[in-house]
Amino acid sequence: MELRHLRTFRVVARTLNFTRAAAELHYAQSSVTEQIQALEAELGSKLFDRGRQLRLTSAGERLLGYADRMLSLAEEAKAAVEENRGEPEGELTAGALETLCAQWIPDVLSEYRAKWPRVRLTLKEGGRGELYQAVRQSEVDVCFTFGSPPDDPAFASESLGDEPLVVLVPPGHPLSGKETLEPGDLRGVGFLATPKGCGFREMLDRIDGPVVDAEVGSIAALGRCVAAGMGCALVPALADHGDAVAVPLAGETTAVTMTWRRRDEHKPNVAALLATARRVRA
């Protein structure tokens, strides 16, 4: 079995969509289909039911665990060779939340690229849960999120500092004229929030008082909805505020957390990115 076929299979198994898998892998959709068909022919079993909704067959579910192990072993072998070579080169994939992709990580990757031009960098944007899963499956080498680190012994995490939180309020809102807000000022105030499980939602849920009136899928959309008068929102100060008014929330911050697979921390590419992030964000 070719490793590239297993990598493609794993992405299709996660997305359950050939089009999305092709876009993520930077392949033509026909190439993804051909690789899956080649793997099925080699194994003599169908890996996906191609009905109205793509789903794994029982054979596909069994293969997925082996694919994870085989690809992890291949990564370990590659890391062992790279560690002896010492010089970062090849490929490295970083992942980050939407806000960090736009406002925070470009400086880190720019310095990394300038120092290690032989490394082909890829940046993936996603939600916190998606990013942790991508790190777990070796699809992302290092990810950057807000909030506390994941509770997983296979991961190593490190805080790169705290970002202050602000409350976005519509222009003309009773809170818009305040220089700072205390958590008690938010009691009974209508808020927009990202869905449960998102780091931004956890920030809001730990404050006693705000009333969640609606959920919005992205930070950029939150800012626009607040500016349109739909309610208030809690975001890191570096998030895009749009036309909303940003009022600091006294004493409230969130950590920027860097997470990677513990076994990969000595790989030259990964070690260089960790060191660059620490230096740039110090």
Image: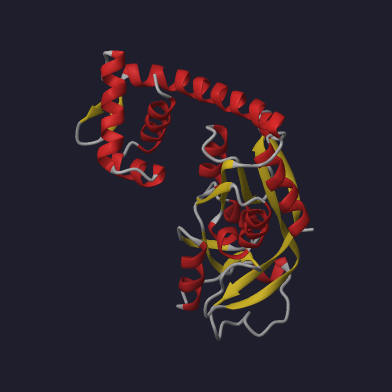
Give the quadrant of residue 266. Answer: top right
Instruction: State the image coordinates of residue 230 (x, y, percent, origin top left).
Output: 46, 73
Residue 37 in view of the camera: yes
Instruction: State the image coordinates of residue 107 (x, y, percent, origin top left).
Output: 65, 62
Farthest residue toward the left? 51
Give the quadrant of residue 259. Answer: top right
Instruction: State the image coordinates of residue 48 (x, y, percent, origin top left).
Output: 28, 26
The vertical placement of 154 against 210, above or below, is above
The vertical placement of 232 against 137, above or below, is below
Screen quadrant of the C terminus: bottom right
Q: Residue at x 28, y 24 (%)?
A: 38
Farthest residue toward the top? 44
Residue 150 in view of the camera: no
The vertical placement of 3 against 148, above or below, is above
Q: Residue at x 54, y 46 (%)?
A: 197
Q: Residue at x 45, y 58 (%)?
A: 217
Residue in front for this viewpoint, 81 or 24 = 81
Instruction: State the image coordinates of residue 1 (x, y, percent, origin top left).
Output: 39, 19
